Each structure stands twice: as structure tokens, then as C-alpha cells.
Amino acid sequence: MGPNGARPVVCYTDVGGTFTDCFVVTESGDFALGKAPTTPDGIAEGFLNALAMARENLGLTQEEFLGGLDVIGYGATTVLNAILTRRGGRPGMLITRGFEDLLTMERGKQSWVTLPRVDRIHPVTHRRQPPLIPRSRVCGVTERYDSVGAEIIPLREQDVRLGVQELVRAGADAIVVTYLWSFLNDAHEVRTREIALEELRGLGREDVPVYLSSEVSPTLRELPRANATTIEAFAGPTTLQALARIEGDLQAGGFSGDLQVMQSAGGLAPARHVRAIDTAMSGPVGGLVGARFIGELYGFKDLISTDVGGTSFDVGLVSGGFIGIDREPVLGGLLLSLPMMEVHSVGAGGGTLSWIDQLTGRLVVGPQSAGAKPGPVCYGRGGTQPTVTDADLVLGYLNPVGLLGGQVGLDEEAARAAIRTQIAEPLGLTVEEAADGIRRVIDTRMREAVTGLVELRGSRLQDYVLLGFGGAGPSHLCGYTEGLPLKATLTFPYAATFTAFGAASADYEHHYHRAVNVVLPPKADDATLLAVAERLTGAWSRLEDQAIEQMQREGFRREQISLRPLAMVRYGRQLNDLVTPSPVSRCATPGDVRAVLAAFEELYTKVYAKGAQFPQAGYEIFEVGLVAAAKKVKPWLVKQDLRAADPGEARYDVRPAYWRGEWHPTPRYRWEALVPGNVVQGPAVIEATTTTLVVPPDRAARIDEFKTVWIEG
């Protein structure tokens, strides 16, 4: 049992680039946190260590802890890391003859999409990504469908057989099938898999899986579709094997449920039924889901989620209660045709490296990171280049006892020496001035990321509530929000594990999509709209059958499953569409189609602006989608009575810290001892086991009924 004898109910763990976070909720509404260094060489170790810390904080045995849980969730960037490091399988590809160089040629956008925003305006260079499948493991197959799904060249089956044999000889451990227009008619891809499996059995290679682009990503544009399928073949087997091992360890320890995995488009799904590609950005997405959950609690519709981890600064928007969906996201420099919640990331975190540019003589901070290994200099794990965390320690903001209650020791002298020799002396500064410069540079970069995203959407900062979280979030929150005219600024006692908290608040979900290729002229007549209604309804019906079959296979009854149809709509000739929830479950009349278009128009004004509408261009719907969901137990926050404003009982020490060019005695508070109603006036440092809140002299921290911290001033 947990606090007050309460049983743990929900546990969610987020595997980040530097730390693995765990958030546990008991049936009484209390929660416990766990945090452990990420173990890149074996994610299970860091995962289980974070669970162990949360379990110990609850005072439970492993059997009591795992046996009591209804839900254990998992989120990570494992797939993304595999792409970035190019550590994965050796897939081969069968593709429509004449397109064998697709992955090498790429597409114009993919060659500059990784450039900074300013450089994209007039790109003078390109960054081509090394293909995950080299040209030597790509074979052409004679076949062709046209743009309406009609066969114009039959599948040449002998090409498939010879291609499979060649790929096996080349060492392929998986086969990707990508044919043009297969999302409209998948018959050639399905037949290709049948033939490939026959050949593989004959070669004694039944262990080689076959992936179809029409199943992984049945959408328009062959490059993103090929990329998505290739990534599933490249990183999927090892990722899913790791999840299976984790689930096996949990069940051996007494857990009786299924390991649930956060998906990039939002929602949880059982590990054994999820696709690896759908988990690519599951970590950062948890923060956005959590922001929306907090917004619902307080009645906020417009929120900015800011997550400062060890490696990156992730920013997302909730506008009008709606989380934007990126229809063509980028993963490791590769364009994908899979919807993901829109999260913008910059290289800015606790582990971000700093140095002096040899050409300009200026201080540079990031985007490179020390990561989990070796980490900052002060960790004593082999790091030699000063990081943001080293600067925070030198300035007196971090407790020299160490992180995680002393589990991660901090060597202040090593951090000071690195900053002195590599930054301060070359610039003619004191160590404190150099450390303060590192901190100001990184805070400015994070502030610009926030303002840039809001301005890009044509919105006003005054309308938004900003949520700051992540292990390093509270330490820098007052810095990167300085001078911003926000409606409110919040952080949380569980800030270090907020993405895990957010993911725990998600429902079970599966996302499905299918191409329809609908073009509507402006002011279309009823006959045209009726034909469109039939196409939309036919596609939604097919997706519903698929969704219900899968959810029932996972143990849900039909009455537990809710279905939400989507339409991906854009104005005529635009390049990007919006994922529009349909107000009708079926399109039976011209009026139903008009209702879908009206929903798109309303959404368009929220994402962009009312003046940007352009119905005179007509509409295009190239794809429809469906979200199948089922409710699950979620975390909840217990409302408590407000008490006195004086936080004196939580104050435990006074140590010097560096503020605006001088050292000042600074009160230290234990975060867990603060109670609703307390107001901590800056300068102050509020310490928790997993994070630290830095409050500068001109600001204050107020604790509300839910123990949420409001930054004032």
C-alpha cells in the first residue's frame, strides 16, 4: 500500500535522452515520483531503476507495487535515437521500377527541413540525409497503378522473386514494399508480400518480415510513405523486442496487465499491438497531453507547454483546447506521412554544451548536448566540456549534495575549472560572469522558441498560460519567461516527471487513416457533394471495421469503444492540410459534407486567423482518419485547503547564490514541505528530489489548492 494505505493505480515512465522519469498515482490521489539516469545501451535498466525509486518512495515491496497497478505506461524516443545514430536493422526495398533512387534523391523539402528557421528563407545549402536503405539493397519491380487506383501495368511476379533473392543475398533482414499509388489500390503490394513470403520460406529465411507501405502509411506522397515504412523495418524489430522484454520483466515481478505505450498522435496502446513508428515522439507528446489536462482542470483553453530536459527544449501549443497535428512531421531529418502532435524542439537543455567559437571569439551554447553519457562535467562521468547544468551549479542554484537525493553526485570544483579554463579566461571574465553568460544565452534561446511559435500562429502571448516542466524546467522558467506578457506562468511539484504525468492522463487510442483524393470546387452543387459524401463514408466505414476488430482483439467490448472520424482538409492548391474532427459520423447528404467543411473553416481560424480563410479556392480532402478510443483510469489532483502565506516551516537553509552580478544569501526551501497558500518571495531556491525551482529577486512563487506553483511578478 502507498501513503495512507492507498494502493498504487497508475504508473507511467518516460525515457528521455538523459533521465528516465516515473510518475505513480495511488487510489487516494497521492502521487510518487521516480527518476533515474537513462541507460542508452539497454533501456530496460533505466526504466526499472526509475520504477524502483517510485516504489521506494511509496514504501512498497516489488510484489505490492507491481501487483497493485492497473496501468503501466511507457514513452520514449527510442525510435528517434535509432534514426539519429543510424543503429538499426538492414532492411531492403522492393519499389516500382524506375523509382529505385527515391531514398537517395529525396525531395526538395527534405534537403533543407533541418536548417534553422532563418536559413530556410533563402537556403543556400542542403543537408542530404544518408538513406536508411542503401541503393545496393533496393530492387525495382515492374508494376503500376494510376492516380485513381486503376491498374495500367500488371505486377511482374518474376521481378518480385528475383528481387527477394537478391535482397537476401545482400544481407537484408527485412523487406519494405513501396509501390506508387498503392494507398489507393493495395492489390500489388499484398500479392508481393505473398510471393515474398513464399520465396523466403524456400530460402529458409522465415525470420525476415515484409512491410507494406499501404499498411504502415496509406497516404499520398511516395517519399514520406517510403520513409515511414523504412523506419518501421529499420527500428521496429529491436524497439518492439525491447518492449516485450520490459513487459515480460514486469509480469514476472507481479504485474498482471499490459504495458501501454504512448503514441506520437496521442493516446495509449498495448505494447504488443503498437507499431514502432507510432511511438517515435511519444515522450514530448506526453507533455502536451498533460498541458491540456491541466487546462481542463483550471478552465484554460490556450496553453504553452515548455519542457526543458537534458538534451532539448520542447514547445507545444494548446489553442482553444485544440492540440495541433503535424501532418508531415520530420524524424531525424526524414519526412513522414504519419500524423503526430505538433511539438517544436530546439537543442537547449541541462546537458547543452558551451564553448568559444574560434572564428568569432563569441560564447556559443548548444545545440549539441552531453547526453546521458558522459553528461555534464560535474557528474564526474568523463564529461570535459562545460554545460548549462555546470553553470547552474557554479551560480549556487543547485544543491551541491547532488541530484536525486544524492544518487547523482555533483563536483562543483570540476565544473568551475571547466568553465574557468574554457570560457572565462578566454573571454576575460570571472567564473561567475561566464556561468551567468551561459545561463542567459540558453534562456534567451528558449524564450525565442516560445515567442516564435506563438507569433507564427498569429496569436498573442497575453492570451496564453505557460506551463514549465522537465528536469531543468523550474530552474530556468523565470529566465526564459522574463519580460513575456503571459496570462500566467505555472510549474508543478512533479515538473520533472510531467511528461509521464501527461501521458498517464491519456486514454487508450488507435489512429487510422486512408487516402480518398477528393477535390471540391468552390460552391459545389449538391450532386458533386453527394458523390463526395459516398467516398468519405466508404473510407470511414472501412476504417471503423478495422478499428473495432483491433480494439475487440485487445479485450474491449464494442460499447466501450468510441469512434471519432477525421477529415484532412485544405484549401485548393495549398500544400498542407488540417486534421478536422468531423461533426458527423457519416456523410449521407450534401449538408453533411458542408458541415465537415464548416468545421474545417472554424478550425482554420483557430490555427491561423479569420482573415486567412480562402474558400474561393475550393477544398481538397486527400485523406480521412479515425480515432478509436476507450477510457482508462487517470491521475487526479486532490484539492486542499489554503493555509498561511508564510513558508517558514519549509525553509531549511541559507546559502549564497549569484544574482545580477553579485553573491547574495539565498533562502532554501524544501518543495515537499510547502503547503497550499504559501508564498515564497525571491530571491529563493526551492528544492525537490527531482528538480529545483529558481526564483529571482523580483519574482515570487505562490502555491495553490492543487499545489500548483504560480510564478508572479
Image (spheres, grey):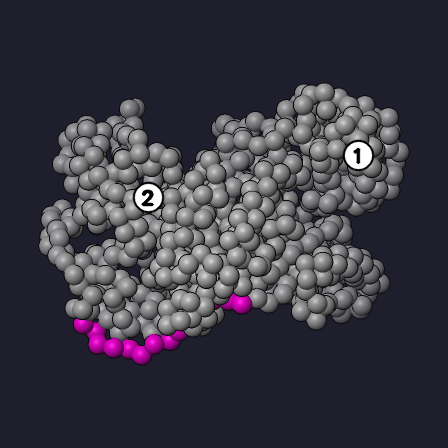
Q: Which of the 4 image quarters holds residue 676? A: bottom left
- Residue 257 on image: x %, y %: 58, 59
Front one among 14 and 445: 14
User: Label 1 neighbourhood size at 10 Å, few (<14), some (14-19), many (20+)?
Assistant: some
Please provide the residue range marked out in magenta: 633-646
- Residue 513 on image: x %, y %: 70, 52
Q: Decide whether the magenta segment is chiefly helix, strand or loop.
A: loop
Up-down: is 160 above or below 311?
above
Q: Which mark is residue 350?
A: 2
Up-down: is 281 above or below 483?
above
Residue drawn at point x = 24 percent, y = 71 percent? 678
Q: The residue tagged with tag 1: helix, strand or loop?
A: helix
Q: Is residue 466 visible?
A: no
Q: Which residue is mark 1?
A: 197
In the displayed structure image, the side of residue 602 where residue 194 appears, left or right: right
Taking the magenta stretch, the answer to whether it contains residue 640 is: yes
Q: What is the three-letter code of the residue carrying label 2?
A: Gly
Q: Nearer the viewer, mark 2 or mark 1?
A: 1
User: Label 2 neighbourhood size at 10 Å, few (<14), some (14-19), many (20+)?
Assistant: many
Q: What is the three-letter code of the residue carrying label 1?
A: Leu
- Residue 699 on image: x %, y %: 22, 61
- Mark 2–mark 1 Cα distance, whole angstroms, equals 48 Å
Q: The residue tagged with tag 2: helix, strand or loop?
A: loop
Taking the magenta stretch, the answer to whether it contains residue 571 is: no
